[in-house]
Image (tube, grey):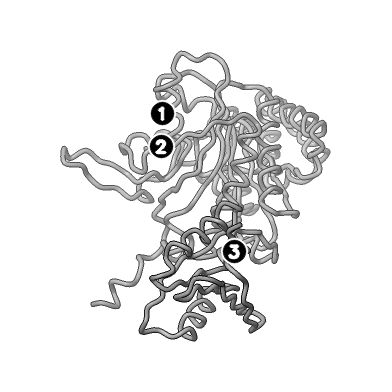
Amino acid sequence: MTNKLLHTPDGVRDIYGAECTRKTVIQDKMLKVFHLCGYQDIETPTFEFFDIFSEARGSVKSREMFKFFDRDNRTLVLRPDETPAIARCAAKYFLNEDMPIRLCYMERTFINHSSYQGRLKEASQTGVELIGDDSADSDAEVLAMVIWALRNAGLNEIKVELGEVDFFKGLLEEAGMDGIQEESLRELIENKNYIGVEELVMAQSISEELKQAFLKLPELFGSLDQIREAKSLTKNQRALRAIERLEEVNRILSIYGLADYVSYDLGMLSQYQYYTGIIFKAYTSGSGDYIVNGGRYDNLLEQFGKDSPAVGFGISVDNLLLALSRQNIKTEIPVTNTMILYEQVSREKAILLAEHFRSSGVAVQLQLKDSSRSMEDYEAYARRRELMNLLYLDERGISVSIHNLSMGRIDEIPLSEYLK
């Protein structure tokens, strides 16, 4: 029974020590980028009413949510997706604001993935939402922030895949497919299942031109020039406007000097049905999955009472940390590498010595010596905690005995040298 109590459920894990510190440092590096771009912090509740994230809003499927009931028997869920939560907040607190709102966050999401998928069910996510601006400039801004944030976190190899859901939706609108057919086609295209797409499309009573456009859709990825070729496949105005939007975003990213980070994919779709314009994912080597997911969702806030366009993204901190580790990218983290060990009669001087170091920005552990333990015990303990130095103040409290654990050397320095 005791051993069972030490285990965590599937899909969650403990993080401690240097790994936990590294995660905090990485998150702070990305938040710094967001703050420099004028974004303000927001924090939403860990659990909310089920309706905030219902499938009707295009969020996570109901079976993938962690659901429970409050004392009034209302259905609550652990937050599976940050975007609807921030949309609710924006509608509540910025209802009458008709100018752009820039928000950033660092939260956890909870999705009940199937156990065979091997994904964490509790995941750390940081990201931004830009509300109230429907321009290509705002699309380019959030894409630029993705690249800046990942570079600031330490990544060098970054590839952003950019799509536009209106190209697909324009073709669907023209084809007049029902919901079941649309969902099937969406899944086939997302998985680039060419045979499946062909079988479904050829069974439809639509024009030959439209059939060819659907059949070509899984192949429409690569450079912007390859995407431009899609203009010859259709006369659908909604689809053509989608390509023009990507061209405009590309021009703005070129001004930022970031266009080379981006490739294009008109066959890119998303499990989140609330996306209405650009959608994108960012990848790097060392991660089998995308590390950033985002897009434009111009109709979501309207469901909460605020008719406002919006665009944003979320960065999977867990996937990012995995990629950094596999690429052997080191992150400098503040570490405690010194312990001050003191006898009880030297307590006051030990505290003054610790304050001396801490006021200079040097982290130290302060530890009262147990008379039943030897110096060797404390040296072994310090090594287990990956400390480099052990400073010892004996009963006299006149000098500091410095034990350099990495070099196996002991020096003696008068305490007065520190406390001048």
Contact flag, marks 3 and 2 (Cβ < 8 Å): no
Q: Is 10 on the left or on the right of 185, as rendered?
A: left
Report whether 355 appears left or right of 137. left
- Label 3 to label 2: alpha-carbon separation: 51 Å
Write the residue at 77% across / 38% down: 227
Task: Name the secondary structure under disc 1.
Answer: helix
Foreground mark, 3 or 2?
3
Circle 2 residues within 10 Å: few <14, some 14–19, many ≥20: some
- Category of crowding for the residue at label 1, using alpha-carbon neighbours closer than 10 angstroms: few (below 14), some (14–19), many (at least 20): many
The residue that disc 3 covers is 416
Residue 338 at x, y percent in the picture: 56, 68
The residue at which mark 1 appears reads as: 88
Which image quarter: residue 143?
top right
- Three-letter amino acid code at disc 3? Ser
The residue singled out by tag 2 in the image is 44
Labelled pair 2, 1 in contact (Cβ < 8 Å): yes
Which residue is at a point 42% across and 35% down the rendered structure image?
A: 85
Check disc 3 and report its element: helix, strand or loop.
helix
Answer with the quarter of the image where residue 217 lies: top right
Q: Where 198 falls versus 258 (above or below)?
A: below
